[in-house]
Image (spheres, rainbow, N blue to C red):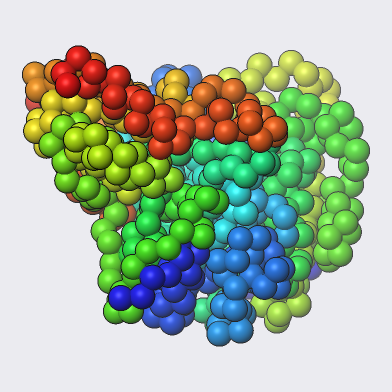
Amino acid sequence: MGMDMNKDELIALYRQMLLIRIFEDKSAEMYAKAKIGGFLHLYNGQEAIAVGALSALRPDDDLVTHYRDHGYALARGLNANAVMAELFGREGGTTGGRGGSMHLADVDKHFWGGYAIVGGHLPLAVGLAYANVHHKTDRIVMCVMGDGSTNIGTFHAALNWAQLWKLPVIFLVENNMYAMGTAINVHSAVIEIYKKASAHDMYAERVDGKDVLAVHEVVCRLAERARGGEGPALLEAVTYRYRGHSMADSDVQRSKSEIAEQKMRDPIPTFAENVLLKRNLLTQADMDRIQKEIEAEVEAAVQFADASPEPALNTLYENIYAHPVANMQSGGSLIGPATLYSGNGKHG
Amino acid sequence: MAEITYREALKRALREELAHDPDVVVWGEDIVAYGGGGAYGVTAGLSKEFPGRIRDTPIAEEAIVGVGIGAAMGGCRPVVELMTINFALVAWDQIVNHAAKQHHMFNGKIKVPMVMRSPAGFGRTAATHSQNFDAWLSSIPGLKVVEPATPYDAKGLLKSAIRDDDPVFFIEHLQLYGTRGEVPDEEYFIPLGVSERKREGKHLTVVTWGRMLVETMKAAKTLSDEGVELDVIDLRTLRPMDLSLAIESVKKTNHAIVVEEGWRSIGLGAEIVASLQEQAFNYLDAPIARVAGLEVPMPYAKNLERATLPFADDVVMAVRAMLANKY
């Protein structure tokens, strides 16, 4: 597996996984320093899935994800500066501080966003796939979710519709064994998630989500299949997240020994040892240098985010509508742009 | 000018927009084959004229709206039909958390040019099938809400809604589908967010929309025979709401009643009354009154259903009561 990838491509996989890991650790640090607010869902441990999957897609294939989206944003090539600035809620962020951690996006890169209502984005992915077919493009859609989303109504409604209309969607389920803190055997009657696709007559596979090349290989096949008009597929990638559900999660429900055991087979050093070092693609010195380069890149992202201004108050009413019409704010309201412009707070 | 039904006016709007733009698609439950085109016949025959673009969907409203949102993000202009507005509740997350949020939350980079058509109203269908959520829907930033009362407005507003780049919830009314009115053969548009004076009068302002416009116009005829002339303002669009005509009217008549079909508490009438008193308080000779539906889950029995809903008689009585001291 991965034999079709050249040296540079294999090293790129390593760099991306490491970038995500270091970026997430830095995000946790920034959260502790209150530079980041609200929810922060980190991707540590699951890096091989985003990196393996996106390396198998074309850059113009559409991507829709859940809220644990930092890894996908970075793997799709979004600038770490803009991603960190978004976490900080700054003007220089990916959505100018409107969306935050859970709603990273870059439509120019066909990343249509992270979504934070569990399962809510699945129908959107099906609709994007319809638009691709309607416009006679051969772009496909990847829709990423967690195991916890496979119990909600939209999961089944979206799978049924995609299969019914033979739309080019890959539903990628990251099975990290927990829906927030609820273990899979407690939240799902079917613990081998890929089997749920059979209820909708959909092709499905299961892959080791800690093996970046295995993920890459299977997504290559599923993408070719979808692009060729053979319809959607579901891929279950079995993985484990090292941190709690979010930074607000004390993570008391998982045992320390379970987490430690999972870390024994970490996707990043495993790939480095079994592929990069074994095939003499990199030396330990190279790897140390890459580590330092990425640490510097992430540190620069923090500097960029910190220097980026807060969004201007007078932009608050922008983009509520694409096509504003007269009388947009209802008459007589005391809360209006005029009072915001004056900087006097809500009640002018 | 030919008189056609509200139902036919909607169909003509769909036909014209399907012909105008190949990205317009129409999806819904039972809109192709069943009964010749939809539970209420609006799409009858269109699937033959536009093969592949009028499609039946599963009974899964969260997917009908959600797949529509995705298609709209991808450059289509879906018109999705929710068989009744009561079923919009199944799609509530998609309407509120997705359709209405996309443009702002993604900083203007994503657009959702989608229309959700759905009839509100009643007809001996009991509590879960006799509602109108216009107040809920109209409270959501990011959404536009339209509720036409006449065939002419229905056609012109639906065409504008389909060409609009924002998600529009287009509320139709079961009791209006069969009503008739003049609709020109020539193409025309009615802009969203613009109210209209449907009747000129000097004694009292009625602000209303949807089916209650029809009832108000009946009441106006009765009252005119008594020498009372209503100034009737039809809002037509509920979000964004244009109260400019209503305010101007109140300054002239010094009396106002808001007439709505939905539940009174926390209803649109409450919002309209608040706005009118904020902007025309010194012109009012009496507290603004509301005529609204009674706050009960709709019963099935014919007499109870009738008692729950406002009709022309209720408007007549409210007007008489307000003007009692004056005439």
Q: Quadrant of residue A309?
A: top left
Q: Which residue lies furthest to the front in this view?
A: B225
Q: In which quarter of the image is the C terminus of chain B?
A: top left
Kindly identify the residue that appears in the image at 45 percent across and 20 percent down.
B265
**Residue A119 image-quadrant placement:** top right
Observer-nearest of B6 and A117: B6
Image quadrant containing the N terminus of chain B:
bottom left
Q: List x then y, in percent, for residue B164.
A: 34, 61
Residue B128, position as x, y percentages in the image: 67, 36
At a point 54% along the width and 22% down the height, the residue shown is B295
In terms of depth relative to the viewer, which is nearer, B92 or A239?
B92
Q: Position of residue B196 (x, y in %)?
A: 23, 50
Relative side of A243 to B157, left or right: right
In the rendered structure, the answer to whether residue A147 lies left or right of residue A26 reads right
> Relative to A118, is A212 above or below?
below
Name the residue nearer the viewer: A256 or A286.
A256
Q: Does any portion of residue A141 appear in the rendered image? A: no
Total labels drawn? 0
- Rendered location of residue B30, percent (x, y): 69, 64
Give the residue at x 43% y 82%.
B19
Viewer-proximal residue among B275 and A50: B275
